[in-house]
Image (cartoon, rainbow, N blue to C red):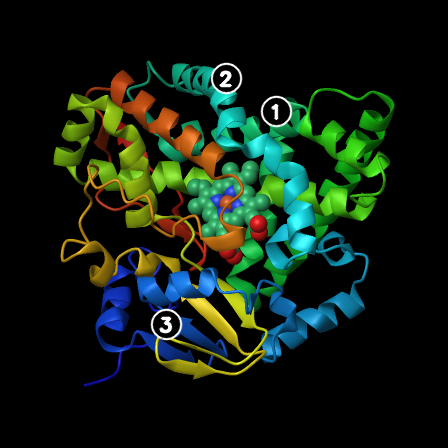
Amino acid sequence: MVTAEFNPFTPGALADPYPMYRELLAHNPVSWNSVMETWIFTRYADVDAILTHPAMSADRRSGSNRFAEMQRKQIEEQPNSPFNRAPTMLTTDPPEHTRLRGLVSKAFTPRAVENLRPRIQNIVDGLLADVADKGEMDLVQALGYPLPVIVIAELLGVPTEDRGKFKKWSDEIVATLGGPFTPPEVLQAAASSINELTAYLSEVIDDRRKNPRDDLISGLVAAEDEGNVLSTEEIYTTLVLLLVAGNETTTHLIDNGMLALLKNPEQVQLLRDDPSLIKSAVEELLRFTGPVQGTGRVLTEDVEIGGQAMKARETAFVILGAANHDPAKWGDDAHKLDVTRNPIDHVGLGDGIHFCLGAPLARAEAQIAISTMLERFPKLKLAVDEPEWGGTFIIRGVKSLPLTF
Ligand code: HEM
């Protein structure tokens, strides 16, 4: 028998990577991948152990493989490229991580996001009103794509009229998350997007220094003024991170989630019969078809996990999508969508100190978007058997989702 192997580049792997994950979980749960030069982990217990382990660094550039070396070289060659000027919370360890995350975390607490719910509902209603009398829509264009960018733009305090620009910049930056396998033209587009976005933000930041408002950018500027807790470079990279991290991911949660639901009409019926299931349903969608499929860490010392001994500076890549379908954790029906499951400890939003900062916001947007769609359109149906999939093997999502109603 051929041993199961992690190869996200085979045809069909983007549309449905779960059969490959099942094979890995059953026959090769921990493996060495010679193309990515990393250990690959699939079991829930191992993935969670890595995400919460103190010897697992988020500074991917500190690794010993050639991809980490390429990243170090890129910093030397392009020291002024915005993400190279200052690291973000996503790639730092304590104490830097604690400081960077602490400054923005207040804006994303469940309570702060609770206050945003009426506004999110208002935006969803407005976007759906634009298509309501047409009888058909592409969910990606109508709702999944515009909603997160409008919300984050308002929260940061940048004009929503500029959302088209933000979306383009953030999509082009996220497209590089295929890592070392990203084509040069995609890298080029991302580099110019980062530069344009930084130039744009520098004007907004200057304005907030002179005219502070009640928004996140003013808050960050004030933190800088009050004793250099945050450098100007860090304000930029934090803002770019917030714009980028929450856009495509939330779009995909809404679109992939609605696709999974419409393929399982009995689950839609359960939700229609009991709308209070929406919170559990969104957690189940994050487990069942979460947009973020994997992330990586670098070992700061020799560690053994899941029976695998690893050396300091080696890399561990954890497949969140596989862990979320591990029968050892979720039972024999792990591969089934069940909106009543309420799988609160799924790893679709990560775990440990890097657990998604925007989780309350992503959850609120998806809950409101999906429940409003079901309430408003009783005859909602897929207009295609299988939509076209895009994104990368790390951030996975449909390109369009034609629906009739
Ligand atoms: C459904 C939507 C989303 C998903 C699936 C998602 C997923 C994730 C995951 C898996 C991580 C951990 C990465 C790692 O450990 O390496 C993460 C971190 C992060 N997410 Fe999200 N995210 C979503 C939405 C958002 C939103 C809306 C925002 C902000 C507006 C956001 C901001 C962040 C930030 C800043 C981090 C880094 C946290 C840290 O390193 O301490 N995300 N996200």
Q: State the residue in front, 56 or 379.
A: 56
Viewer-nearest of discs 2 and 3? 2
In the figure, is residue 309 to the left or right of 87? Answer: left
Q: Position of residue 394 (x, y in %)?
A: 45, 58
Check disc 2 and give the amino acid type: Arg
Q: Is residue 190 above or below residue 148?
A: below
Q: Position of residue 223 (x, y in %)?
A: 78, 35
Mark 3 and mark 1: Cα distance apart in space? 39 Å
Q: Residues within 10 Å of mark 1 (few under 14, many from 20)?
A: some
Q: Is residue 182 above or below residue 308?
A: above
Can you identify the residue that label 1 sits on? 154
Can you identify the residue that label 2 sits on? 119
Question: Is residue 155 among the parts visible in the rendering?
Answer: yes
Q: Secondary structure at mark 3?
A: loop
Mark 1 and mark 2: Cα distance apart in space? 10 Å
- Looking at this rendering, what residue extends furthest in the bottom direction? 1
Q: Residue at x 27, y 60 (%)?
A: 18
Instruction: Mark 3 or mark 1: name the one nearer the start of the chain.
Output: 3
Check disc 3 and give the amino acid type: Asn
Check disc 1 and give the amino acid type: Glu
Can you identify the residue that label 3 sits on? 7
Q: Residue at x 65, y 30 (%)?
A: 156
Mark 3 in CB contact with mark 1 (< 8 angstroms):
no
Q: Secondary structure at mark 2?
A: helix
The label number, if any, that marks residue 304 in the structure image:
none
Q: Residue at x 21, y 72 (%)?
A: 26
